[in-house]
Image (cartoon, rainbow, N blue to C red):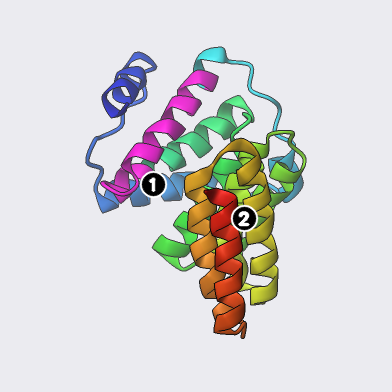
Amino acid sequence: VINAGFAAFELCNIPISREPTNLQVLKEVLLLKWELKNMTDGQLMNLPPIENKEMDVLIRIMIYVVSNTYRMNPNLSGMLFLKVFRLQLKYGATIESAMVYINYALLLIAGFNDIKQAMRFGKLAMTLADHQNSIVIKARIYFTYGIFLNHWEEDYKTSIKYMRVMQQYGEQVGLNYQVTATSCFLCATQLANGTSLKELDELSSKIRERII
């Protein structure tokens, strides 16, 4: 997948290093921030749909490559999503726009501790997902927002709500890995929120029955 992705980048004249440095990632962040500096939430929510079919396919390929690189090479994953975001601003929105926003939010939190902007883009992703018909997109956005973003502003109860919604969506479309991962985070969050061990044990048994 990764080699095929880089072949596609070359065909579309999109130069991306397989081992981007921190400086290269920072440069891409600054370029994106410059392009975003005067854009309102309304403008970001209503980008015109992409018309360039080649770029539409390329953006999807880049997102697939990220899913295969984020554990092995965080810099490459970050660089790809930054590139995707800039391509989206240039060519228009795709069905994966919510995924682009939520991953940019994660990058802002993990790399720059920019909670305010991270929550801005996380909420944009949630709104976009809620307006889409794709259950897969909804499941992935609720997974990321409920586990990694919501607790920066809201209480655990809200995080638990989002995780449960993700489980419902995930079970509908067979995202068993994400459903199982969410169950682990859900148990930990409920424990932190004051749920007793007995209640957690009962909850875990119900989750195992549904998954198996």
Residue at numbered disc 2? 122
Q: Main secondary structure of the magenta part?
A: helix
Mark 2, secondary structure of its residue: helix
Residue at numbered disc 1? 78
x, y (%) of residue 120?
A: 65, 58
Residue type at mark 1 is: Gly
Image: 11 above or below 38: above
Measure how far apart labels 1 and 2 are at the Cα level: 16 Å
Instruction: Between residue 74 and residue 91, name the one nearer to us.
Output: 74
Estimate how packed mark 2 is, as few (under 14), some (14 to 19) or many (20 or more) residues with alpha carbons within 10 Å: many
x, y (%) of residue 15?
A: 31, 27
x, y (%) of residue 66?
A: 39, 38
**Which circle marks residue 203 in the picture?**
none
x, y (%) of residue 63?
A: 45, 34
Residue for point 54% across, 71% down: 187
Q: Is 94 on the left or on the right of 106, as rendered?
A: right
Q: Is 111 on the left or on the right of 40, as rendered?
A: left
Query: Magenta segment range?
Result: 56-78
Magenta run includes residue 57: yes
Mark 1, secondary structure of its residue: helix
Mark 1 or 2, nearer chain start: 1
Instruction: Between residue 119 and residue 26, name the one nearer to us.
Output: 119
Q: Is 109 on the left or on the right of 120, as rendered?
A: left
Residue for point 57% across, 29% down: 90
Using the rendered image of the protein, determine whether residue 148 is visible from the camera's viewpoint: no
Image: 186 above or below 178: below
Residue for point 75% across, 45% down: 130
Using the rendered image of the protein, determine whether residue 19 is visible from the camera's viewpoint: yes
